[in-house]
Image: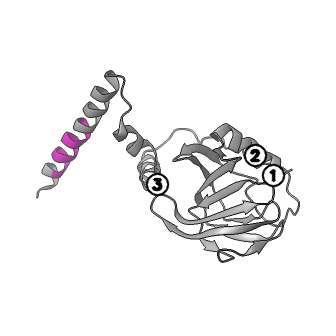
């Protein structure tokens, strides 16, 4: 297939997707395509790669979001670049590798690979909060292992990490998760 034919087909597909989204949203329906193309770790990486190819006249000002940590030598969840809703939780972006530590005593309920969040770990803390960490790189413990406060439980490479918090049987909203992270780190 010729180079120009590939571009023509790509443009037709793009216009078709945009038209389908507009038609679905015009009828007050939620477009599953918009969700597919605005969320997801793979598409986020592709979007960032494409945007990096275009020259910019100014460099964006990055403001680190952080909270005080107990040990300044260990990077934790305290400093993140951005946070956006994803599935039933949030995607938190980091520009450096971090170590995820247990916020309090608890037990690890699940470690494994899931379809939507990759390598995933779920921890039940003594306070009753059930926290799921996704897109982690390495686990430090196996399921049904007890953890103490400040124990290393996972490591995350630069990129995104999924966080979902369930309290009293209900999922916390993204704004509540942001407050939960700030409360944990103080």
Q: How far apart are labels 3 and 1 at the CA level? A: 29 Å
Lateral position of residue 68 relative to residue 30, left or right = right
Q: How far apart are labels 2 and 1 at the CA level? A: 6 Å
Residue on which the image places disc 1: 184
Residue on which the image places disc 2: 180
Asked if the magenta segment contains residue 170, the reply would be: no
- Between 136 and 55, the one lying in front of the other is 136
Q: Nearer the viewer, mark 2 or mark 3?
A: 2
Task: Find residue 130 and report its image quarter.
Answer: bottom right
Residue at (67, 56) in percent of width and height? 131
The spot of residue 83 in percent (x, y) is: 62, 45
Q: Give the residues drawn in magenta, as a range.
A: 6-15
- Between 150 and 37, the one lying in front of the other is 150
Residue on which the image places disc 3: 45
- Between 178 and 30, the one lying in front of the other is 30
State the residue lying farthest toward the front.
169
């Amino acid at each position: 297939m010729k180079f120009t034919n590939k571009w023509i087909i790509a443009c037709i597909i793009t216009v078709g997707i945009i038209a389908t989204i507009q038609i679905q949203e015009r009828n007050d329906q939620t477009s599953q395509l918009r969700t597919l193309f605005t969320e997801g770790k793979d598409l986020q990486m592709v979007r960032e790669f494409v945007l990096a190819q275009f020259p910019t006249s100014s460099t964006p000002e990055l403001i680190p979001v952080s909270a005080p940590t107990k040990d300044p030598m260990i990077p934790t969840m305290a400093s993140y670049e951005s946070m956006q809703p994803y599935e039933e939780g949030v995607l938190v972006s980091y520009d450096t590798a971090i170590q995820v530590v247990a916020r309090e005593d608890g037990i690890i309920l699940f470690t494994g690979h899931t379809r939507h969040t990759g390598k995933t770990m779920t921890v039940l803390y003594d306070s009753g909060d059930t926290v799921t960490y996704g897109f982690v790189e390495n686990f430090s413990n196996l399921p049904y292992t007890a953890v103490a406060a400040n124990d290393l439980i996972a490591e995350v490479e630069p990129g995104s990490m999924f966080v979902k918090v369930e309290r009293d049987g209900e999922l916390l909203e993204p704004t509540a998760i942001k407050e939960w992270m700030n409360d944990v780190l103080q």
